[in-house]
Image (cartoon, helix red, strand yellow):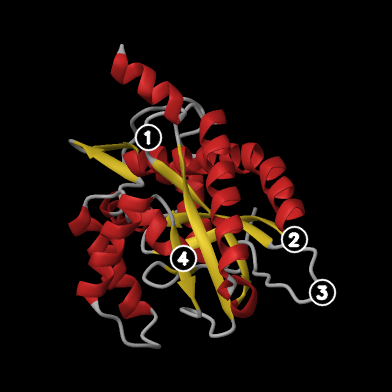
Amino acid sequence: MMTAVGVLDKVMAILDAFEDGATRLDPAAVASRVGFSTPTTYRLMKAMSQHRLLDLEERDYRLGSRLLELGSRARTGVHVRTVALPHMRALRDALGETVELQIRTGHRRVPIEMAVGRRTVRTTGQIGVPLPIHMGASSRVLIAWLNEERAMELAAESAAEWPGRAWDADTYRSRLRQVRDQGWEYSDGERDPETSAVSAPVHDAEGYVVAALVVSSTMTRLADDTHRAEVIHELRRTARAVSGELGYPTPHEQEQETLG
């Protein structure tokens, strides 16, 4: 497949050169397979190795470790979305509010699934559009269980990319600790002055946070203490159900393991 981006086409052609089972190839061998000059192929393969798309072994290259990481993320995203969607729809029907599933990619968060609310006035977003990791309830949920310094690095990178409003690192660090303690997060007009959101983590079998489940609404509705309490309760229950299907122990199972 050819696109309008020639360099990308060449990178994909080089990766495809390994598809017949060859584990190690030198630039000359790759050049003969893809039809590029050897200097061009060498230059591209060297750059690809810097991004770990290829790994250099002596004078030969093999497919890089980053491809495994990306493939794992892709499989996780597809699996989480498949498991979560029925629960998201049930949560949407119970609350009437929009429910999103978001994952982290570097210092960004991306909605990968959505169940749009039933109410006349409702919030909505766009699947696949990157959002900042330093603003919003789901942002803190997605990084709160990382090493704290790494989480702060990601938030700082996000703040540099989206410099629209002031960002206080000390306040953010404190909020991350609060999220870990309480197991959920609430934001009020933080990214959009007319919307609020509540978010809870989705864990996999190893305990990693692989996604954030989000209920978003108008500021007016989530300002109501009774409705917000219901949203938090139902959201956390749903996040635990999705995590359980991914193999994460339920609180009862965790207690049994501790007692055992």
Identify the residue at image location x=60%, y=56%.
230
Residue type for callout 1: Gly
Q: Residues within 10 Å of mark 3 (few under 14, many from 20)?
A: few
Identify the residue at image location x=63%, y=42%.
84
Dot 4: element: strand
Identify the residue at image location x=40%, y=55%.
142
Q: Is residue 100 visible in the rendered structure shown here?
A: yes
N-terminal-most mark, 4 or 2: 2
N-terminal-most mark, 1 or 3: 3
Q: Quadrant of residue 119?
A: bottom right
Check whether the beta carbons of the residues at disc 2 and disc 3 lie within 8 A of each other. Answer: no
Q: Which mark is residue 96?
A: 2
Q: Position of residue 58 (x, y in %)?
A: 17, 35
Q: In this figure, which residue is indicated by the disc labeled 3?
A: 120
N-terminal-most mark, 3 or 4: 3
Dot 3: element: loop
Q: Which mark is residue 207?
A: 1
N-terminal-most mark, 4 or 1: 4
Q: Residues within 10 Å of mark 2 (few under 14, many from 20)?
A: some
